[in-house]
Image (spheres, coloured by chain):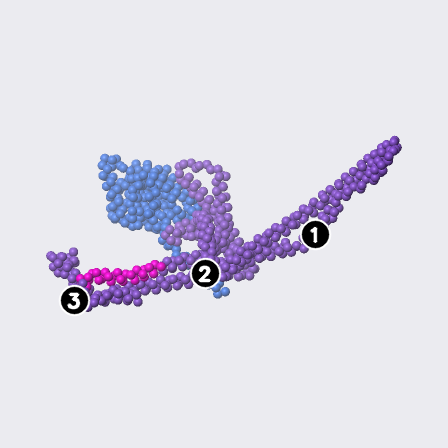
Chain colours: A purple, B blue
């Protein structure tokens, strides 16, 4: 309050003092009007240009980053599709070499079987029974005009002989059909064989057609990537996001496994390195040792899969000669088995330590120990040992999602960075625009404060018969420049 | 070949780096339990066993524990019934706990009441033991009615030093005179609190309900 009073000319007359003070300030501000307007315009222009410059730089950098990301993404995508196409061609080659390489032999076999079937078919053609000779004889007798008993006797004899011949013919006819049925029955395996061979060829052809379609699809994608279209870039970027999400989920599950693994060996590790040593205030040396064991298992898994050429995280291992690579593979496998065995025994030790502590607590308490079924107590122990042995191998497979995360993270981070830079650029441009408008607002506000001297100025100029200069237009033109 | 050398060097230097990172402060607990065996309070020893069992169950490998009796003149190593610094390995520590429990059992069977109660002498002895063992957290538990009675010629009216030690009085039973005038009980506790805090103790607790022993090792 005292501070305020020191500004007043007459502290007991506040209104008058404030009025005089305002009058003096107005005169000062009016006198400094032009340079003040210049300063406001310059400062706002400076800030606006600086922000616009920064926004433009960010936009250009973001574009450069996007182009670089695009190149890397397309290169990586091309390499991936190339390897897929190569694999498809390998499959086709294998199919052609294995199945169609034997095609002449299959064809010959089929032709032989078909010829045999044809022959058999011809053999079993129906042979018409010979026309009975007695039919002519019977016609001659029937044409006799008289004969009496002779004719009757002849007819009876003829009937007998016809009956005999008929029986004989029927028997022969049946025998012939039996033979033809036998031939047809013998044809059945050949038919089946031909059918099987035809189906086999058919399935191979379908497989070939499927492979060809897959190759076509891959080739289409490859061509799109080669032509560097935005669509292919967008597809690859989305694919990276999806892969990162899936791999992260798998990694999360693996992290859960690693945590269980850690819990299994943390307690028994205190038996090896001591329970009272600390690395930091809350971090026990035994816990760190257990963590190191778990991480070593994961590392061995990474090296194992890398040397098996399942993952490609280390170019050094990928470019090694096969002999050295196999040595690394066996070394990693042996070390992994050793670590798994150690962990299994540590899991057993953990169970023993817990049992020992429980026994000690029973000794301390006055309550009699609860009788336990030996089988029930052995099941968790066996379970822990099995988990201790199996979990390192399960952890070994974490190398696959890890590789995907490593490769897709670059793309995802790149895309997010570009988006972030664009957003910041937009914000900066917005701020620049605000500063640009702000200069006008401030100039007008300044003029409102000194409105009285300005009115006086206008009145004086009016008396002299001159025109009022339009400062704001000057200012506008300056701002625009 | 050059790269291999660097790797080898880095591998050899790794233990040094870890050693540099290691926290050299002690994180172990050291507990000294004073059991009052004077007069009728000697009958409370069975309750003291509950505290000892709690301590044995909750102290970890590397921790220290000592149990001493408070007699007519307690500033003596002879009054220490059992003391141990548990092995760094949990399995060995469990064996040591069993042996310790055995000693306490024998002591509880043969406890004899003393004529006087030298709590100050016991406190000085306890501080001496804890400072020698130098654990990260030092705790003295006094299992007593906190009524000090010194024999003729026993001098204890001088400032004592309990710097960095937590002190707690457990099972502070009310005497018949306390029942007549409770202020005597409250004054007695206040006097001990002042004496202990003046001696530089970090904390002072009174636990009369033995179901709430979790405060004993809770250093937060």
Which stretch did the figure color magenta? Answer: A426-454
Q: Is residue A127 left or right of residue A319?
A: right
Closer to the camera in the image, A137 or A109: A137
Q: Which mark is residue A70?
A: 2
Q: Residue at x 42, y 58 (%)?
A: A415
Cα separation between marks 3 and 2: 71 Å
Crowd class of label 1 (few under 14; some 14 to 19; many from 20; radius 10 Å): few
Tell me the distance, in whole angstroms, between the alpha carbons under discs 3 and 1. 124 Å
Q: Residue A154: x and y, percent? A: 86, 34
**Callout 2 secondary element:** helix
Q: Residue at x 41, y 62 (%)?
A: A63
- The residue that mark 1 highlights is A111
Q: Badge 2 sits on which subunit?
A: A
Q: Where residue A69 sits: x, y (%)?
A: 44, 60
Residue at 31% x, 43% y: name it. Answer: B142
Does the stretch in magenta take in A156? Answer: no
């Amino acid at each position: 309050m005292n501070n305020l009073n020191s500004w007043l000319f007459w502290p007991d007359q506040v209104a008058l003092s404030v009025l005089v003070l305002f009058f003096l300030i107005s005169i000062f501000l009016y006198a400094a009007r032009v340079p003040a307007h210049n300063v406001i315009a310059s400062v706002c222009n400076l800030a606006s240009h600086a922000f616009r410059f920064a926004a433009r730089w960010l936009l250009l950098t973001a574009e450069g980053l996007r182009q670089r990301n695009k190149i890397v993404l397309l290169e990586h995508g091309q390499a991936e599709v190339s390897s897929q196409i190569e694999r498809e061609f390998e499959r086709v080659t294998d199919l052609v070499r294995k199945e169609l390489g034997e095609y002449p032999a299959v064809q010959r076999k089929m032709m032989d079987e078909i010829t045999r079937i044809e022959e058999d078919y011809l053999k079993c053609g129906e042979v018409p029974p010979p026309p009975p000779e007695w039919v002519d004889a019977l016609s001659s007798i029937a044409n006799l005009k008289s004969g009496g008993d002779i004719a009757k006797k002849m007819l009876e004899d003829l009937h007998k002989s016809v009956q005999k011949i008929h029986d004989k013919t029927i028997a022969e006819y049946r025998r012939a059909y039996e033979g033809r049925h036998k031939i047809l029955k013998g044809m059945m395996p050949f038919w089946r064989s031909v059918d099987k061979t035809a189906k086999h060829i058919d399935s191979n052809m379908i497989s070939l057609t499927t492979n060809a379609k897959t190759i076509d699809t891959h080739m289409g994608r490859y061509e799109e990537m080669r032509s560097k279209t935005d669509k292919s870039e967008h597809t690859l970027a989305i694919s990276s996001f999806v892969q990162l999400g899936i791999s992260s989920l798998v990694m999360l599950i693996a992290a859960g496994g690693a945590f269980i693994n850690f819990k299994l060996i943390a307690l028994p590790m205190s038996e090896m390195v001591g329970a009272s040593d600390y690395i930091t205030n809350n971090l026990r040396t035994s816990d760190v040792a257990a963590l190191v064991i778990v991480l070593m298992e994961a590392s061995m898994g990474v090296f194992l899969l890398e040397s098996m050429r399942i993952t490609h995280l280390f170019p050094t291992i990928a470019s090694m000669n096969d002999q050295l690579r196999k040595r690394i593979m066996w070394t990693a496998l042996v070390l992994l088995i050793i670590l798994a065995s150690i962990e299994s025994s540590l899991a057993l030790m953990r169970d023993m330590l817990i049992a020992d502590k429980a026994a000690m607590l029973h000794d301390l308490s006055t309550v009699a120990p609860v009788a336990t079924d030996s089988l029930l107590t052995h099941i968790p122990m066996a379970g822990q040992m099995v988990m201790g042995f199996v979990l390192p191998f399960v952890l070994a497979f974490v190398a696959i999602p890890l590789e995907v995360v490593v490769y897709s993270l670059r793309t995802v981070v790149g895309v997010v960075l570009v988006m972030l830079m664009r957003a910041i650029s937009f914000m900066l441009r917005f701020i620049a625009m605000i500063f640009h408008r702000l200069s006008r607002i401030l100039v007008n506000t300044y003029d409102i404060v000194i409105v009285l001297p300005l009115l006086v100025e206008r009145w004086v100029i009016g008396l002299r018969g001159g025109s009022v200069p339009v400062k704001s237009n000057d200012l506008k033109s300056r701002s625009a420049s | 070949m050059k790269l291999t050398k660097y790797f080898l060097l880095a591998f050899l230097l790794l233990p040094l780096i870890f050693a540099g990172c290691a926290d050299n402060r002690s994180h172990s607990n050291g507990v000294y339990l004073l059991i009052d065996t004077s007069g009728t309070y000697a009958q409370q020893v069975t309750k003291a066993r509950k505290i000892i069992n709690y301590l044995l169950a909750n102290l970890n490998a590397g921790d220290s524990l000592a149990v001493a009796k408070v007699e007519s003149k307690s500033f003596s190593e002879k009054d220490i019934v059992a003391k141990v610094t548990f092995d760094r390995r949990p399995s060995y520590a469990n064996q040591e706990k069993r042996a310790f429990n055995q000693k306490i059992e024998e002591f509880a069977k043969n406890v004899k009441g003393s004529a006087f109660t030298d709590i100050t002498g016991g406190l000085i002895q306890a501080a001496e033991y804890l400072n020698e063992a130098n654990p990260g957290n030092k705790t003295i538990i006094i299992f007593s009615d906190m009524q000090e009675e010194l024999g003729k010629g026993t001098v204890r009216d001088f400032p004592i030093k309990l710097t960095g030690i937590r002190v707690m009085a457990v099972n502070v039973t009310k005497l018949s005179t306390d029942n007549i005038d409770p202020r005597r009980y409250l004054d007695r506790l206040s006097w001990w609190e002042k004496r202990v805090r003046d001696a530089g103790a970090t904390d002072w607790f009174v636990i009369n309900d033995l179901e709430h022993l979790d405060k004993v090792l809770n250093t937060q």
